[in-house]
Image (cartoon, rainbow, N blue to C red):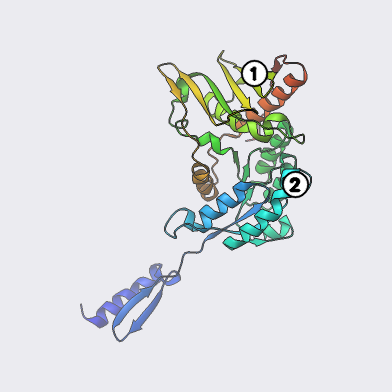
């Protein structure tokens, strides 16, 4: 094929789809295609009172262009976040300063942020604010990841999922500990019980397990499923035990550690073996699920399981206040199809 024929052949391909992706460059040396850079999807963050905000931003904005992470960019952040919880008030100025080093613009309102982004991380540490903040995002139909806790009550969590259905906007919430080494690989149909543990420091603004112990509760329900019917809380100095009974007769527990050496882990009892969960590997395994969720709109965690976690925590709090008496869990409301 002569140089001129080759040029005519390549030009004939442009109407088939190359025209909107490429530019043709003809020079004395011959023909070449100039490929434009792929346009990255833009992510906004609500809440700069969580260290997760920085961890996610660094992982995404420092990623290589040819990776999954490289298809996204964290571009905007609204810092608040709680204005009343002491830990949050202390963190926000520091994280604001740090996140701007990664090219993120700090904005003055959620409304302003939503105009600039395709997807949202809701990272506010204060679960009491999540319903109000999530509603603003869902109304704008921006796919939303809500970091733990999804809320500070079953009622608020339910309203979030109902709003997601009303506005046709996908939402996903999870702790990173759902993806602790060894958990996802287990055959859940063989799990007959589990004892898991995590740090469980508390804050007066939240029911106990919503603040930090939710990491262990997330592990427990990822193993056992949503069928817990009662829970009782046993409190001693430095430790709380939460013992749940499932509707099929299985029993499982959470140990919340508040004194001494703490860590994440657990023992899982299966029909044919006993498995010890591995190490917490940071936020990468969670982010590996969030970004595909943004692309597909399909949550990797069933909403009923997330609601069951909230029902467990609410009942555990009631049991604590009632001296450890067993408390029935809120019956999970049916969500519209």
Residue 251's place in the image compared with 226, above or below, is above
Disc 2 target residue: 82
Q: Nearer the viewer, residue 200 or 304?
A: 200
Q: Residue at x 66, y 37 (%)?
A: 149
Kindly report which numbered mark, 2 or 1, lies closer to the viewer in this rendering. 2
- The image quadrant of residue 219 is top right
Specify the quadrant that holds the C terminus.
Answer: top right
Q: Nearer the viewer, residue 23 or 285?
A: 285
Disc 1 target residue: 229
Local secondary structure at mark 1 = strand
Regarding residue 332, the answer to whether it shows in the image is no
Local secondary structure at mark 2 = loop
- The image quadrant of residue 253 is top right
* In contact (CB < 8 Å): disc 2 and disc 1: no
- The image quadrant of residue 305 is top right
Q: Position of residue 181 (x, y in %)?
A: 46, 34
Q: Residue at x 43, y 31 (%)?
A: 185
**In this rendering, would 169 be left or right of 34?**
right
């Amino acid at each position: 094929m002569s140089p001129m024929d080759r040029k005519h052949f390549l030009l004939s391909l442009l109407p088939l789809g190359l025209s909107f992706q490429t530019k043709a460059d003809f020079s004395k040396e011959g023909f070449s295609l100039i490929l434009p850079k792929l346009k990255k999807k833009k992510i906004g963050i609500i809440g700069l009172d969580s260290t997760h905000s920085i961890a996610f931003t660094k992982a995404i904005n420092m990623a290589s262009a040819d990776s999954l992470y490289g298809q996204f960019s964290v571009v905007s952040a609204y810092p608040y976040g709680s204005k009343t919880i002491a830990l949050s008030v202390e963190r926000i100025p520091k994280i604001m300063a740090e996140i701007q080093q990664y090219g993120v613009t700090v904005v003055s309102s959620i409304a302003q942020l939503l105009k600039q982004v395709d997807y949202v991380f809701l990272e506010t540490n204060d679960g009491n604010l999540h319903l109000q903040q999530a509603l603003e995002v869902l109304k704008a139909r921006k796919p939303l990841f809500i970091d733990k806790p999804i809320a500070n009550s079953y009622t608020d969590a339910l309203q979030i999922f109902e709003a997601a259905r009303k506005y046709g906007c996908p939402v996903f919430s999870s702790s990173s500990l759902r993806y602790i080494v060894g958990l996802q690989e287990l055959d859940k149909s063989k799990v007959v019980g589990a004892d898991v543990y995590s740090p469980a420091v508390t804050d007066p603004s939240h029911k106990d397990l919503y603040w930090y112990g939710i990491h262990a509760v997330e592990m427990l329900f990822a193993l056992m499923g949503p069928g817990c019917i009662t829970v009782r809380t046993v409190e001693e100095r430095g430790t709380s035990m939460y013992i749940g009974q499932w509707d099929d007769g299985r029993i499982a527990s959470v140990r919340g550690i508040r004194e001494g050496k703490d860590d994440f882990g657990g023992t899982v009892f299966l029909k044919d073996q006993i498995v010890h969960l591995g190490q917490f590997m940071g936020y990468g395994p969670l982010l590996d699920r969030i970004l595909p969720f943004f692309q597909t709109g399909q949550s990797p965690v069933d909403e009923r399981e997330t609601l069951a976690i909230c029902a467990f925590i609410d009942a555990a709090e009631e049991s604590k206040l009632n001296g450890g008496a067993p408390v029935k869990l809120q019956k999970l409301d049916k969500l519209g199809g």
